Amino acid sequence: MMNPSQNVDTLAALAEVIESRKGMDPQNSYVARLFHEGDDTMLQKVGEEAVEFILAGKSMDSEHLVAEAADVWFHMLVFLSQRGLGPNDILNELNRREGLSGLDEKASRDPA
């Protein structure tokens, strides 16, 4: 099993690969195709993968669940990249929330 810093390195490396694919030919790269097709396609893929994750969660197959979670994370990272964000933005937010009660954190959000 990887240590936490290796996991962060894995996310950072994946984010770099995603960034490097932005300008590639959409016929040669799945990520480039997602960037070419735009926000709606990217968000649709996040939604599809989230549904597949939920369905996998209803089964007792941990390996399938983890695979679907990886698909959700991957597609979320692609969309975050589209918006100029990456894994560190999410990790920073999780760090900000560390030690906060989940109920208190949720109550502190704008009711938008």
Image (cartoon, rainbow, N blue to C red):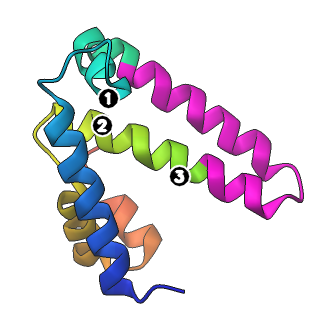
The structure residue drawn at horizontal position 58% and vertical position 34%, both measured from the top left corner, is 49
Label 3 Cα neighbours within 10 Å, binned few <14 / some 14-19 / many ≥20: some
Counting from the top left corner in percent of width and height, residue 57 is at 77, 52
Q: Specify whether residue 100 is painted magenta.
A: no
Q: Is residue 109 visible?
A: no
**Which residue carries the number 1 mark?**
31
Assign a secondary structure to mark 2.
Answer: helix
Quadrant containing the C terminus is: top left
Label 2 Cα neighbours within 10 Å, binned few <14 / some 14-19 / many ≥20: many
> Which region of the structure is painted magenta?
42-68
| The quadrant where residue 83 appears | top left
Number of the label disc, if any, that sits on residue 78: 2
- Badge 1 or badge 2: first in the primary sequence: 1
Q: Is residue 112 above or below residue 33?
A: below
User: In the image, what residue type sits under mark 3?
Assistant: Ala
The structure residue drawn at horizontal position 53% and vertical position 28%, both measured from the top left corner, is 47
**Which residue carries the number 3 mark?**
70
Counting from the top left corner in percent of width and height, residue 105 is at 34, 67
Q: Is residue 19 above or below residue 63?
A: above
- Badge 2 or badge 3: first in the primary sequence: 3
Marks 1 and 3, how far apart at CA? 15 Å
Assign a secondary structure to mark 3.
Answer: helix
Q: Is residue 83 visible?
A: yes
The structure residue drawn at horizontal position 37% and vertical position 41%, both measured from the top left corner, is 76
